[in-house]
């Protein structure tokens, strides 16, 4: 049944991707026709077609590897590791370490092809081999250290509260919730600096106008920096960080190069809108809520030894419980995505409205068009695809709402 569930989720996801691809072939809505020239749009269609096909291939490959692991190697791995050590936490770390390590290695050629072949051919890629390699090593180090610490901690809590399911779930939720809050408040900024270089925005009209805008909406700025996003891609963005009223503004250098001052100001006003409505905080709360669900899910799996017997494990195994949970949670995740993503899209409309009020309706619309053009956004996504996966409304809907 679990294997059938995996296949069903994959089939459903592929079907929605196909619907989305078909929708992208239909004529464009009037409002977004002037974003790309025809040649560029055709190029985008070819790009997304190729990317979709490639992603589905990768997912199918991952699915086959997982099914293979489920059909015997997981049980074998648990047995071998149990021969090495009696420490249950160490067993969990080794078990998931080996599995994740294999998945990580298998992912590299896919990532490599996506970046240096697909994105390269469509003029999207700016990553060098050195940056690619450095990112790979950094993410591996972070995954092993942070993942290891969190996993060991949760497993420790389980060993302590194994007889009392709800104490385990609530304690795990509380501990992970505090860690996540810390991450949202401080670590985010530190992490992004590991991967990018920041330079202060030089004095000039743009800087003055940004400061005036922030003052006008009641925020003070600690710094305004430009981030070297072009090292990795041509996509444009900007964001605020910091808690309280004092903010740090970060502009992607790609945004500074491709958008006009008016458009940059509109983008920043949109971000200030998110700050004003505390959208980042709300999002953090929603994600912490999800972590509670994860803890409950893992706890429930651990209550069912028959699930472990079915895959040839002699007893309940914490590491394998995490794997099982990640499978069982997939269909639920799809369902939960619907209200989750809808709330995020509502926040985008609200921030657009805020930006248009604080700057200018025309600037905001023009900024959205520049972003859609430079990011090669899908101008015609399928509604079901939007419901399941879109954190931002389609560009046509955003412009319609502003009009
Ligand atoms: Zn936004």
Image: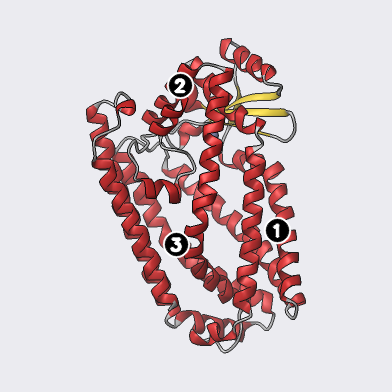
| Nearest to N terminus: mark 2 or mark 3 | 3
Residue at left 70%, top 23%?
221
N-term-proximal mark, 3 vs 1: 3
Query: Which image quarter holds the C terminus?
Result: top left
For the point 33% across and 58% down, the residue is 14
Q: Residue at (45%, 17%) from the top-left corner?
A: 362
Which residue is denoted by mark 3 in the rendering?
105
State the separation of the CA atoms marked 2 and 3: 36 Å
Residue 62 point in image, percent of width and height: 39, 65
Ligand 1 falls in quadrant: top right
Kindly state the secondary structure of the residue where label 2 is placed.
helix
User: Is 358 placed above or below 244 here?
Assistant: above
Circle nearer the viewer, 1 or 2: 1
SS assignment at label 1: helix
Spatial distance from mark 3 to mark 1, Cα to Cα?
28 Å
Residue 106, quarter of picture: bottom left
Some atom of ligand 1 lies within 8 Å of the CB belonging to the residue at label 3: no
Which mark is nearer the camera, 3 or 1? 1
Judged left or right of residue 91, residue 108 is left
Number of other residues with Cα within 10 Å of mark 2, as a class: few under 14, some 14 to 19, many 20 or more? few
In this rendering, the answer to whether 174 lies above or below 282 is below
Q: Ligand 1 closer than 8 Å to the CB at disc 1?
A: no
Q: Are marks 2 and 3 in contact (CB under 8 Å)?
A: no
Q: Which mark is residue 338?
A: none
Q: Which residue is mark 1?
A: 176
Q: Secondary structure at mark 3?
A: helix
- Residue 52 horizontal side relative to residue 220, left or right: left
Query: For the view shown, which residue lies furthest in the top direction?
Result: 205
Instruction: Classify mark 3: residues with Cα within 10 Å, few (<14), some (14-19) or many (20+).
Output: few
The residue where tag 2 is placed is 257
Cβ(mark 2) to ligand 1 < 8 Å? no
**Contact? badges 1 and 2 (CB < 8 Å):** no
């Amino acid at each position: 049944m679990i294997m059938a569930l995996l296949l069903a989720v994959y089939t459903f996801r592929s079907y929605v991707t196909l619907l989305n691809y078909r929708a992208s072939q239909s004529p464009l809505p009037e409002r977004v026709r002037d974003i790309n020239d025809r040649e560029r749009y055709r190029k985008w269609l070819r790009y997304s077609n190729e990317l979709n096909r490639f992603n589905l291939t990768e997912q199918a490959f991952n699915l086959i590897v997982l099914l293979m692991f489920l059909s015997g190697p997981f049980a074998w791995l648990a047995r071998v590791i149990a021969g090495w050590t009696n420490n249950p936490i160490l067993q969990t770390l080794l078990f998931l370490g080996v599995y994740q390590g294999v998945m990580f290695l298998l992912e590299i050629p896919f990532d490599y092809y996506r970046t240096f072949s697909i994105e390269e051919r469509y003029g999207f890629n700016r990553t060098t081999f050195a940056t690619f390699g450095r990112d790979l090593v950094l993410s591996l180090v972070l995954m092993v250290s942070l993942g290891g610490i969190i996993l060991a901690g949760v497993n420790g809590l389980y060993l302590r509260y194994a007889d009392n399911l709800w104490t385990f779930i609530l304690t795990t939720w509380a501990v992970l919730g505090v860690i996540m809050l810390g991450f949202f408040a401080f670590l985010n900024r530190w992490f992004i600096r590991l991967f990018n270089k920041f330079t202060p925005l030089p004095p000039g009209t743009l800087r003055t106008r940004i400061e005036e805008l922030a003052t006008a909406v009641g925020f003070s700025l600690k710094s305004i920096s430009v981030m070297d996003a072009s090292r990795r891609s041509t996509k444009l963005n900007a964001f605020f960080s910091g808690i309280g009223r004092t903010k740090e503004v970060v502009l992607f250098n790609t945004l500074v190069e491709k958008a006009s001052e008016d458009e940059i100001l509109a983008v920043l006003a949109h971000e200030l809108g998110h700050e004003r409505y505390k959208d980042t905080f709300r999002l953090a709360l929603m994600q912490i809520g999800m972590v509670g669900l994860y803890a409950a899910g893992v706890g429930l799996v651990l209550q069912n030894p028959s699930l472990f017997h079915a895959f040839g494990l002699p007893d309940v195994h914490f590491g394998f419980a995490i794997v099982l949970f990640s499978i069982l949670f997939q269909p639920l995740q799809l369902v939960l995505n619907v209200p989750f993503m809808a709330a995020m899209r509502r926040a985008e409309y609200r921030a657009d409205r805020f930006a248009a009020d604080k700057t200018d309706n025309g600037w905001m619309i023009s900024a959205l068009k520049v972003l859609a053009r430079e990011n090669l956004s899908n101008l015609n996504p399928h509604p079901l695809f939007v419901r399941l996966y879109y954190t931002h409304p389609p560009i046509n809907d955003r412009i319609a709402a502003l009009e």
